[in-house]
Amino acid sequence: MSAYSNQVKDYIERYKAETGHDGLLDPHEVAAWAFHNGLHKPNPRTIIDVIAADISQVFREEYRTDKHGRRYRAKHAATHKKGSKTLSLWADLDDPVAPHEHFVRSFAQRRQQIVGDCLQLKTDVDVYNDKRDPVVPVQVPLDFTLDVAEMQQPLKRAA
């Protein structure tokens, strides 16, 4: 863990001790508290990162509808290595000059993220069930075939 991560963890513990922590943490409240108490001072790089994150969020939220009525995400990100840096580059699905390889990479990376999320969810559920030993253990099916098929069905409108 980096020194920065340790610093953040330290002031989170201080926040919990000083504010009557109830078991739930709002990162915005913790950040405001840390900033107000002089524990976290943004530098220009941090500010640029925040603006870039806002731009990425706007990209992530842009949806369009195709001629078949399917709602699709317009912008797609893929990570690329450039020297020692990892860049997140975005392309618009409707931009004819955006390279095909970008979308192949983006879709593969998104699928891998989903697999990673599923693995972590299964691990978390397994640990929960082992620690709590509930009468009815939490079960989380990870086969989404029927869920996807159901969500692809046209909405049935009430007459």
Image (cartoon, rainbow, N blue to C red):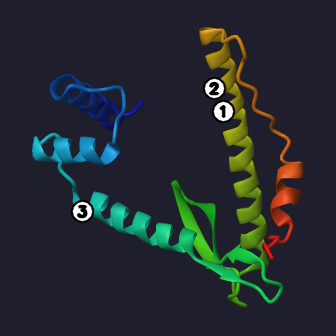
Of helix, strand and loop, which one carries label 1?
helix
Q: Badge 1: few (under 14), some or many (20 or more) residues near its Cα, within 10 Å?
A: few
Q: Is residue 66 above or below residue 52?
A: below
Q: 133 or 41: nearer the eye?
A: 133
Residue 32 is marked as none
Residue at the image point whose x is 76% and y is 27% from the top: 139
Disc ID at residue 44: 3
Picture coordinates of residue 81 (x, y %)? 60, 59
**Residues at marks 3 and 2, CA–CA distance in whole angstroms:** 37 Å
Q: Quadrant of residue 91?
A: bottom right
- Which residue is at a point 89% across and 50% down the rendered structure image? 145
Could you tell me residue 41's position as x and y percent?
Answer: 17, 49
| Residue 89 falls in image quadrant | bottom right
Determine contact: label 3, label 1, CB under 8 Å: no
Label 3 amino acid?
Pro
Q: Amino acid at mark 2?
A: Asp
Which type of secondary structure does the marked residue at label 2 adopt? helix
Give the residue number, with chain letter if any, for mark 1.
120
Q: Are marks 1 and 2 in contact (CB under 8 Å)?
A: yes
* Dot in front, 3 or 1: 1
Q: What's under tag 1, amino acid-wise?
A: Gln
- Marked residue nearer the N-terminal end (3 or 2): 3
Residue situated in front as seen by the camera: 6 or 82: 6
Vertical placement of residue 53 versus 16, above or below: below
- Most distant residue in the front direction: 159
Q: CA distance from mark 1 to mark 2?
A: 6 Å
Reading the image, the residue beneath label 2 is 124
Q: Is residue 87 left or right of residue 105?
A: left
Q: Is residue 87 left or right of residue 22?
A: right
